[in-house]
Image (cartoon, rainbow, N blue to C red):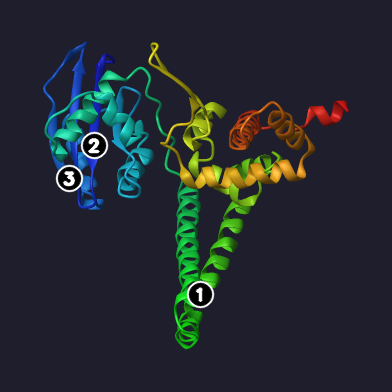
């Protein structure tokens, strides 16, 4: 095979099947896109591999697969590419959609063709996603399940508490007894998941090292450290503090246009709300227990800053330091304390 031959694959994935579009660029000349549909299971992936072989697709840097993050349904394709060293980029669906400009019409086949075109158009800047790590996926699934159980437990508790205020005492007590087993079941499941998460982190050296490094940052405890590891794929691709702050929705951006719009800097509404909520609790803890942040908060308040604006700045600081300690593989050191 000639070295100047390139292969770009766009794959649109759903629960039962996935559509693939293959673009071959030979000596700088684009050939006709080849579309095909396969079942999203082991048998379908075997046919997919045979299809790639028919077109002599190389499993190296001359090829690139582009898919969207679908939650869990893209995992078989991700595993397929990881085990065969086929470069793959798992992109954000919103980012890919907005980069296409105005589009008309939609189908799985059209979407795969657009992903293929996206991969070719941005081939110089797209970063390959790290190989699928079964241990990391297990941790992420445990964390996701814990969040859902906690939401259900909190919702049921709130409902029973509110019922006491509007219902008669006998009915409220009856429902408390009926739901006692469910509440205890939720608590038991949460304890079991918490134990499994701690066990999993302690058994994996790469996860455990980053987990311990993150906990050296003021405000970051056990759950924020675990959540950051899950959100960043254990800080793969050397994610920066600014990227992490944008993802969490705590990075302020300018809001102005000409002479008509002169708004204050603001954070973007697109954010990981769960991470932002955890960071808010962390920021509240830092201004209470850490003199460095307490002095910063009081100084900014005296300057006339709004309390939420200062808290957002502290959330930003926490993430910048979290990314720094992991990327540098060094624990956080408060040099202002050492100097004092």
Q: Nearer the viewer, mark 2 or mark 1?
A: 1
Query: Given contact means CB atoms under 8 Å apart, are the residues at marks 2 and 1 in contact?
Result: no
Label 1: how many Cα within 10 Å (few below 14, some 14–19, many 20+): some
Upstream in the sequence, badge 2 or badge 1?
2
* Mark seen at residue 260: none
**Mark 3 = which residue?**
38
Residue 34 in percent (x, y) is at 13, 30
Tag count? 3
Instruction: Give the quadrant of the C terminus.
Output: top right
- Identify the element where label 3 is drawn: strand
**Mark 1 = which residue?**
183
Label 2: how many Cα within 10 Å (few below 14, some 14–19, many 20+): many
Residue at mark 2 to residue at mark 3: CA–CA distance = 10 Å
- Identify the element where label 1 is drawn: helix
Residue under the image location 13 percent in, 26 percent down? 33
Residue at mark 2 to residue at mark 1: CA–CA distance = 43 Å
Residue under the image location 64 percent in, 45 percent down? 282
Looking at the image, can residue 102 be seen?
A: yes
**Mark 2 = which residue?**
11
Label 3: how many Cα within 10 Å (few below 14, some 14–19, many 20+): some
Residue under the image location 49 percent in, 75 percent down? 165
Query: Given contact means CB atoms under 8 Å apart, are the residues at marks 2 and 3 in contact?
Result: no
From what the image shows, is residue 282 above or below residue 118?
below
125 or 92, nearer to the observer:
92
Q: Which of marks 1 and 3 is in front?
A: 1
């Amino acid at each position: 095979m000639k070295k100047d031959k390139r292969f770009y694959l766009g794959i649109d994935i759903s629960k039962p099947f996935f559509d693939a579009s293959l673009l071959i660029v030979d000596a700088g000349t684009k050939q006709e896109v080849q579309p095909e549909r396969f079942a999203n299971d082991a048998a379908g992936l075997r046919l997919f591999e045979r299809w790639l072989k028919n077109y002599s697709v190389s499993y190296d840097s001359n090829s690139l697969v582009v898919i969207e993050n679908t939650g869990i349904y893209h995992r078989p394709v991700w595993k397929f590419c990881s085990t065969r060293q086929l470069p793959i980029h798992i992109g954000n669906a919103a980012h890919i959609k907005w980069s296409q400009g105005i589009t008309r019409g939609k189908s799985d086949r059209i979407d795969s063709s657009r992903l293929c075109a996206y991969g070719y158009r941005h081939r110089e800047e797209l970063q390959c996603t790290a190989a699928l790590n079964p241990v990391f996926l297990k941790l992420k699934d445990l964390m996701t399940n814990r969040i859902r159980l906690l939401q259900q437990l909190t919702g049921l508790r709130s409902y029973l508490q509110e019922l006491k205020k509007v219902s008669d005492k006998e009915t409220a007590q009856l429902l408390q007894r009926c739901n006692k087993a469910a509440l205890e079941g939720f608590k038991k499941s949460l304890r079991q998941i918490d134990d499994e998460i701690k066990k999993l982190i302690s058994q994996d050296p790469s996860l455990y090292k980053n987990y311990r490094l993150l906990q050296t940052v003021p405000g970051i405890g056990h759950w924020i450290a675990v959540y950051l590891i899950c959100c960043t794929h254990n800080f793969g691709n050397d994610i920066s503090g600014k990227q992490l702050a944008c993802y969490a929705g705590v990075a302020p951006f300018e809001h102005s246009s000409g002479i008509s719009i002169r708004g204050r800097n603001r954070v973007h509404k697109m954010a990981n709300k769960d991470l932002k909520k955890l960071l808010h609790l962390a920021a509240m803890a830092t201004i209470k227990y850490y003199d460095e942040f307490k002095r910063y908060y009081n100084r900014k308040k005296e300057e006339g800053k709004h309390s939420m604006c200062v808290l957002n700045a502290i959330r930003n600081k926490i993430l910048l330091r979290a990314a720094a300690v992991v990327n540098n593989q060094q624990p956080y050191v408060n040099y202002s304390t050492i100097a004092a």
